[in-house]
Amino acid sequence: MQTIYLITTGGTIEKAYSEQSGAVLNNASKVGHYLKLLRLPDCEVRVIPLMNKDSLEMTQKDRAVLVKELTGVLPQDHPIVITHGTDTMVETGLYIEKAFPDLKVPVILTGAMTPLGFEDSDGLQNLTESLLAARLLGAGVFVVIHSQVFPVDQARKDKERGTFVRA
């Protein structure tokens, strides 16, 4: 049985529509619900809901909290997937790479351009692909999105195309 840690930090992938405010907000983690829709017969995904923030609101203190969580999880030598907003995903990935220059497992950042559960959402695809990539990739920090894998230092969000491209 393969174990993968899934740390949620928020971003569009986790947003939900609020009828009260009429806005799309980060209120609570909903990745667990979507994991139940996947067939993962020989994989245990351990979800760690760390925070639920839009990545544009992510601070260096938030990144330090994430690194502290990783410090506790990395010694388990299991792959890690982190859900994160796409706007500052690369910045956070580079922060992780700097904090852990000698990784022994893959650490994958993924997110979505459209929230999970919304029509035409790319969230479930990206989550599924990240779980597969976590089982196949070697050590390092990666961005996995839209059927693409980038070492974090080679990823760049292309807002006009609505995806990531090689930097």
Image: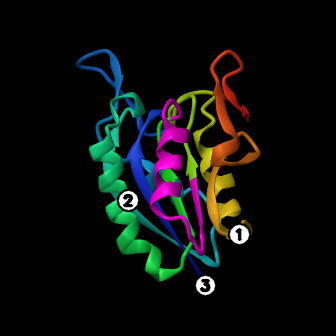
Q: Position of residue 69 (x, y in %)?
A: 34, 64
User: Does residue 39 appear in this view?
Assistant: no
Q: First in sequence, mark 3 or 2: give its number.
A: 3
Q: Which mark is residue 67?
A: 2
Dot 2: element: helix
Dot 3: element: loop
Q: Which mark is residue 138?
A: 1
Q: Residue at x 47, y 36 (%)?
A: 85
Position of the N terminus, as image quadrant, is bottom right
Q: Specify whether 57 is left or right of 12.
A: left
Q: Position of residue 154 (x, y in %)?
A: 70, 42
C-alpha distance separating marks 3 and 1: 18 Å
Q: First in sequence, mark 3 or 1: give its number.
A: 3
Q: Which mark is residue 98?
A: none
Q: Position of residue 8 (x, y in %)?
A: 41, 52
Q: Residue at x 53, y 34 (%)?
A: 86
Q: Residue at x 65, y 45 (%)?
A: 153
Segment tinted magenta in the rendering: 86-108
Colour convention: rainbow
C-alpha distance separating marks 1 and 2: 20 Å
Inspect the image, locate mark 1, and give the three-letter code of the amino acid beneath it: Gly
Residue 17, above or below 117: above
For disc 3, the marked residue is 1
Q: Position of residue 37 (x, y in %)?
A: 57, 56
Tell me, yes or no, whether the two marked residues, 3 and 1, touch with CB atoms within 8 Å.
no
C-alpha distance separating marks 3 and 2: 26 Å
